[in-house]
Amino acid sequence: MKTAAIVLTKSPQVNHLLLESLSFVDEIVLIVDSAPSTAILTPRQKIYFHPLNNNFAAQRNFALKKTKAEWVLFVDDDEYVGTELRNEIFHAIDSKEFSGFRLHRQDVVYHQPLLHGETGKIKILRLARRHSGRFVRPVHETWKVGGLVGDLRSPLYHAKDHFVSEFISRLDQYGQIDSQTLIREGKPFSWFRLFIFPLAKFKLNYFLKRGFLDGLVGLFLAYLMAVQSLSTRIFQWENKK
């Protein structure tokens, strides 16, 4: 059963460790942002240039059209597929019962796994049959797959060694997109959401989901998640004005 790995990246110079971790797939498709719309083909690796245009779902749906493999695995350029997950994927794609599988993404900051907070136990649908569904939502996109979806146990490692600077650099882009998406979903700006939601986001990550057990990194992440929630509401207010 043929499997393709799709990597969304800003540069075609992808970490060689990621590419090595994908040695088990039949095809690697790189979708690169902000470059001329041409394709560079090699026997096992394809590179396509497709501008993001503030729509992550559209970029992933474009990627699905660039492979003919039965199964597709989506990975970001700061993620890594370990041996355990690779072996689990081998067995999973032989299943005739499932249309897709959620993966446990394990955040790692300076070799410290983040075990708590909102992302500590997160599972994301990243492996599915190519024709089983499509992505929706411009940001925080979701793969809507028809049929039965299972869970794999082994982690997909997510390196976040520069998560503070990267998080801050994305606040403007993500906040602008998310503010418009929330309005389309019937969640307009309100003073209640502005004052309550960021505080609730911090309490959720740091206290209820025990982010404090991850030390300073857990504190910083809870704070940044609250700032993201606040910035989205501020963008909503600004757009309303």
Image: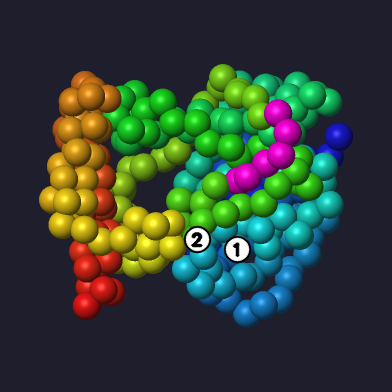
Q: How is the image coloured?
A: rainbow
Magenta-colored span: 143-148
Q: Residues within 10 Å of mark 2 (few under 14, many from 20)?
A: many
| Residue at 60% over, 24% down | 151
**Residue 111 lies in what quarter of the image?**
top left
| Residue at 68% over, 66% down | 48
Residue 58's disc is 1
In whole angstroms, how far apart are the C-alphas of marks 1 and 2?
7 Å
Asked if the residue at tag 2 contacts the one at tag 1, i.e. Cβ–Cβ closer than 8 Å, the answer is yes
Quadrant location of the C terminus?
bottom left
Is 219 placed left or right of 151 in the picture? Answer: left
| Residue at 83% over, 26% down | 96
| Residue at 27% over, 66% down | 236
Residue 186's disc is none
Q: x, y (%) of residue 177?
A: 40, 65
Residue type beneath disc 2: Pro
Q: x, y (%) of residue 88?
A: 67, 22
Q: Which of the two residues, 7 or 15, is positioned nearer the viewer here?
A: 7
Quadrant location of the N terminus?
top right
Task: Count how many numbered circles sit on residues in the image.
Answer: 2
Tell me if residue 77 is in the magenta stretch: no
Ranked by sequence position, the earlier of labels 1 and 2 is 1
Tell me if residue 147 is in the magenta stretch: yes
Q: Is residue 14 above or below residue 205?
A: below
Q: x, y (%) of residue 231?
A: 23, 59
- Residue bearing mark 2: 138
Residue 159 seen in the current view: yes
Residue type beneath disc 1: Ala
Kindly give the residue lying farthest to the right in the view shown: 1
**Residue 25 lies in what quarter of the image?**
top right
